[in-house]
Every structure is written in C-alpha cells, then in structure tokens.
Image (spheres, helix red, strand yellow):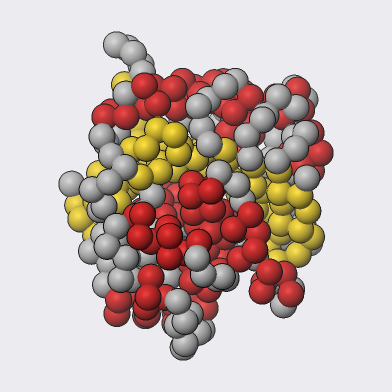
C-alpha cells in the first residue's frame, strides 16, 4: 500500500500552478492544524469559507491501494482503487463511478484530494459502456455490502456517511442506486447524462440530497442533464461551472490517460475547480446531512461569474 504524505510546501506549489494564485486563503494554515477529522469539521463549519480553501490539499496523509478486489459473491467481484484517509476515527466514504468509455483511474485525483480532507475514497470499475441501469443496481448492492460489512473497505468507514459520486452516464447509475434504496447519505453528480427513457422514473423515487455540478452548456451540452433537476422531486441543487467542458468532471480525464498525458478538451484549472466544488459538497453533506454549507461557499464564485445558473428545490 503506497502512502502519500501531503506537505504544506507541495500544497502551496499546487495552488500556484493550477490557479495562478500567490496568496493562500486566510483559513488554510489554520485548517492544517487539525489533529483529527472532528477538529477539522468543527473548524470548517465554524468559519465562513469559499472554494479557494478546497483547491488545496487537506491536512491528512493518504494511503493508496490500487486494484483492490471487492467481492460481491463467490463468483462476482468488482475492481476498485482505495484512497484511505489517515485519521484513526471513523470517516465518510465517497464512492466514485466513471462514465461511458472511462475508468476508475479517471477519478484518482478527486478521490485522493477528498481523502486529504478526511474522507475515504473508493473508485469503482464497472462495465464502461453500460447498461447504466444495471450498473446502478450493482452500485446499490456494493453500497449495501459496505453498509453491512465496512471492513471489506476499512473498519474506519462511517457507514452512515457514504456519499455517491458519478460522472456523465455514471451519474445516471448513481441516481438509480439511490432510487433502489442504496443506504447512502446522498449524491454528487458531475455533469450527469442519460439517454435511458426510464431514468425519470428512478429520479422521481430519490429521497436523498443530490448536488449537480455541471459543465458549461456553451462549451459542451450534456445529453438530458436537465432531467436530473426536473424529475428529482426535492432536495436537489445544481450549479454550472463557467467554461468547463464535460471532460473537466474527471481528473485526470480518460482521454489524457490514454494519450500520453495530453487532452485538448480539459484544463487543469477547471478540473481543480470541479474538485474544489466536489470537496465542499462532500464536506457539507458528510458533516451536516445537507448541502447548505457548500452552497454558501459558492457565493464568491457566483458573484464573480465563475459559477452560474444556480438553482435548488
């Protein structure tokens, strides 16, 4: 198991590279002093913040275990990558599901970033050309298994704080998992898409909080993204990220992974913007059961136009 030890210097360099920012958010150095997850959450919730804080690595080291086999039955298993946060106490688990033609590797940087902020990450490899309804039902089984036996991931998983994240068609699978009763706290959908005419029936059955982080429709229009906000009856919020492409919802993108680290369709700055919004949303949902804290953190970027078209019901 590989261990990544985040350093303060590395985080400063990372901020300068991806955002052109030379000043650290005022709360960042204070957040680094958190000794455990409870301290970090209490500090964050007691201070009004914005997304600049979450562009940076959090205070905790991360243990990475690639190609972890998760057995659903004697004959069925799922390939996963694990990103385990260092604190000894129980912590939330964020489960990532890729989209069409993609892989668990396309969410490695997102999972690692969230783990540095005190949330374990699990990136799944399911059939990447669908069927997405079936993938959603498999995801529901995975969540139920972890809920009953958290030690299949790590004994430190807080089973009452499992959060589902899906990109593109993986977002539709996450929606199906929630509709099918997966014991998750809620979901964060990264520019979700669907072409399955039955998906609205699943969306109407969702009764957990959902956050949609969308790309910019003027850059790339995602198929039927509007379904998610329209058909989830309540407890859903949505916002779009200015200039972001659909592929910016991955980090690294699958295209980059398959083309020697190059992808003309993404920019690291916008990928990190997705990561910062994802982190704020996951912190908010795991600590409070709602997305209210995250929504407040979006105010500065809504005011300056980097985020737009906010809506919630």
**Quadrant housing the C terminus:** top right
Furthest-left residue in this view: 1
- Image position of 235 (left or right of 290): right
Q: Which of 243 and 256 lies nearest the eye of the viewer?
A: 243
**Label total for image:** 0
Furthest-top residue in this view: 74
Q: At x 25% / y 53%, what residue is drawn?
A: 86
Q: Residue 12: where, in percent of width, then height?
A: 37, 80
Q: At x 70% / y 41%, what residue is drawn?
A: 235
Q: At x 53% / y 73%, what residue is drawn?
A: 52
- Image position of 303 (left or right of 256): right
Furthest-bottom residue in this view: 22
- Image position of 153 (left or right of 313): left
Work out whether residue 67 can be spotted.
no
Q: Residue 302: where, in percent of width, then height?
A: 72, 69
Q: At x 66% / y 30%, what residue is drawn?
A: 207
Work out whether residue 181 can be spotted.
yes
Q: Quadrant of residue 13?
A: bottom left
Q: Residue 5: where, in percent of width, then height?
A: 23, 64
Q: Which of 74 and 150 lies nearest the eye of the viewer?
A: 150
Q: Quadrant of residue 297?
A: bottom right
Image position of 299 with respect to 238: above or below: below
Q: Residue 73: where, in percent of width, then height?
A: 34, 13
Q: Quadrant of residue 49?
A: bottom right
Image position of 175 with respect to 85: above or below: above
């Amino acid at each position: 198991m590989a261990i990544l030890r985040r350093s303060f210097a590395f985080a400063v360099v990372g901020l300068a590279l991806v955002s052109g920012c030379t000043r650290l958010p005022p709360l960042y150095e204070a957040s680094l002093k958190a000794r455990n997850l409870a301290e970090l959450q209490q500090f964050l919730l007691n201070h009004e913040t914005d997304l600049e804080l979450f562009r940076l690595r959090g205070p905790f080291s991360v243990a990475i275990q690639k190609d972890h086999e998760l057995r659903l039955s004697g004959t069925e298993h799922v390939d996963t990558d694990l990103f385990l946060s260092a604190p000894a106490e129980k912590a939330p688990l964020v489960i990532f599901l890729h989209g069409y033609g993609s892989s668990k590797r396309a969410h490695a940087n997102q999972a690692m970033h969230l783990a540095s902020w005190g949330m374990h990450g699990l990136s799944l490899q399911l059939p990447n050309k669908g069927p997405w309804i079936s993938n959603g039902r498999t995801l529901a089984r995975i969540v139920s298994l972890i809920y009953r036996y958290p030690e299949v991931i790590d004994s430190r998983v807080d089973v009452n704080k499992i959060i589902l994240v899906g990109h593109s068609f993986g977002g539709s699978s996450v929606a199906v998992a929630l509709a099918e009763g997966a014991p998750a706290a809620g979901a964060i959908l990264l520019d979700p898409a669907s072409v399955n005419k039955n998906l609205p029936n699943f969306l109407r059955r969702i009764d957990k909080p959902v956050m949609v982080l969308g790309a910019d429709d003027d850059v790339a229009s995602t198929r039927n993204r509007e379904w998610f906000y329209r058909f989830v009856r309540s407890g859903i919020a949505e916002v779009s990220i200015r200039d972001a492409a659909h592929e910016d919802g991955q980090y690294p993108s699958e295209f980059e992974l398959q083309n020697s680290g190059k992808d003309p369709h993404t920019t690291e700055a916008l990928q990190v913007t997705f990561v910062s919004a994802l982190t704020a949303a996951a912190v908010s949902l795991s600590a409070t059961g709602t997305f209210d804290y995250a929504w407040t953190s979006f105010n500065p970027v809504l005011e300056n136009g980097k985020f737009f078209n906010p809506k919630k019901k």
